[in-house]
Image: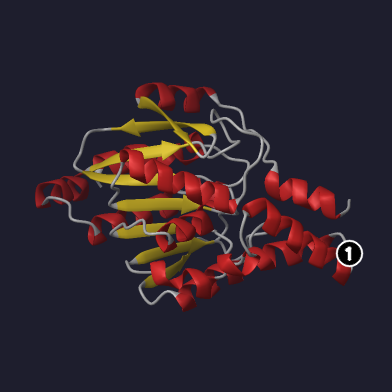
């Protein structure tokens, strides 16, 4: 493996298929499409409540992978939206990146928003931070096992295949050409002006794909953030973990206006 292989891994996601349960979930929602930034994005919505939450998937993933959030959020009084990022799922394109994903969030918010809350997994988290930096506003958000530094992602990949310093610097430059901006522009200090609302961060301390230290760094940089450990959930299984879903819904309910009658109903159901 060389630097071009790493670049392909950072720019050419693998499309995930649908399980039967995911197919049924999407069929139960209302399908939408949006042309944005040269791609046609596939999106879905469930429910018709006034308060709305956007689900943002990670790399090599798709909207339906966050499907276990849909019913609890709808039951809690939210309309739920989700979309397939560029070159993911049913959306078009062959290339993507954290910045492409962030631009797609902005396009979805512009076309179908505003959104009161957001739940993002893995690369979806820094994509959401990019969107907040670019002006998207929500009342609350949940960030699950997300990397907090694009530079550290590149360095970890470089170290894994023993790239030398020159090759690593070349990889950074190639990445910058692909995303259309500097890698430094995706660091927390550059994005911090978007940290304007309460945030919940969830991470398994033993995550083998995205180090737990990434959420620790985000928590330290975000005054309104709370980090909760979901032990043993892993990197991908965490988005279906009952505790992760429960604390996410609780956080959004407590930080976004929801009529008291709905809150009481959720409590009764539990």
> How busy is the neighbourhood of tag 1: few (under 14 within 10 Å), some, or many (20 plus)?
few
Q: Position of residue 149 (x, y in %)?
A: 61, 67
Relative to 118, say whether 132 is above or below. below
User: What percent of the width, then of the height, locates residue 268?
Assistant: 18, 47
The picture quadrant where one finds residue 184 is bottom right
At x 20%, y 39%, the residue is 49
Residue that carries the numbered disc 1 in the rendered image: 162
In this view, the residue in front, 246 or 85, is 85
Q: Quadrant of residue 162?
A: bottom right
Q: Is residue 74 above or below residue 228?
A: above
Q: Nearer the viewer, residue 6 or 261?
A: 6
- Residue sitting at 41 percent across and 71 percent down? 193
On screen, residue 170 versus residue 80, left or right, reads right
Q: Quadrant of residue 185?
A: bottom right
105 above or below 19?
below
* Location of residue 201 in the rendering, given as x and y in whole percent from the top left corner: 45, 64
79 vs 220, left or right, is left
At a point 57% along the width and 70% down the height, the residue shown is 187
Can I make out residue 246 in this image? no
Q: Position of residue 57 (x, y in %)?
A: 51, 45
Q: Is residue 84 visible?
A: yes
Which element is circle 1 on?
loop
Q: Is residue 162 above or below residue 24?
A: below
Tell me the residue at 30%/48% (across/down).
Answer: 115
């Amino acid at each position: 493996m060389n630097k071009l292989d790493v670049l392909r891994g950072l720019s050419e996601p693998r499309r995930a298929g649908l399980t039967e349960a995911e197919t049924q979930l999407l069929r139960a929602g209302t399908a939408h499409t949006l042309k944005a930034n040269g791609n046609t994005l596939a999106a879905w919505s469930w429910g018709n409540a006034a308060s709305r939450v956007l689900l943002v998937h990670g790399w090599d993933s798709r909207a339906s992978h966050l499907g276990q959030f849909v019913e609890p959020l709808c039951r809690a009084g939210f309309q739920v939206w989700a979309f397939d990022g560029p070159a993911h799922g049913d959306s078009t394109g062959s290339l993507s990146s954290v910045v492409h994903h962030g631009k797609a969030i902005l396009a979805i918010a512009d076309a179908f928003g505003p959104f009161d809350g957001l739940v993002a997994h893995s690369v979806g988290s820094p994509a959401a931070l990019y969107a907040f930096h670019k002006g998207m506003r929500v009342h609350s958000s949940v960030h699950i096992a997300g990397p907090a530094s694009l530079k550290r992602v590149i360095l970890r990949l470089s170290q894994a295949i023993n790239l030398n310093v020159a090759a690593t610097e070349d990889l950074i430059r190639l990445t910058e050409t692909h995303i259309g901006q500097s890698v430094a522009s995706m660091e927390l200090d550059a994005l911090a002006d978007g940290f304007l609302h309460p945030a919940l961060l969830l991470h398994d301390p033993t995550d083998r794909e995205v180090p737990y230290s990434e959420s620790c760094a985000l928590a330290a940089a975000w005054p309104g953030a709370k980090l909760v450990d979901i032990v043993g959930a892993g990197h991908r299984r965490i988005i279906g973990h009952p505790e992760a879903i429960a604390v996410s819904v609780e956080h959004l309910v407590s930080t976004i206006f929801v009529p008291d009658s709905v809150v009481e109903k959720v409590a009764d159901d539990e």
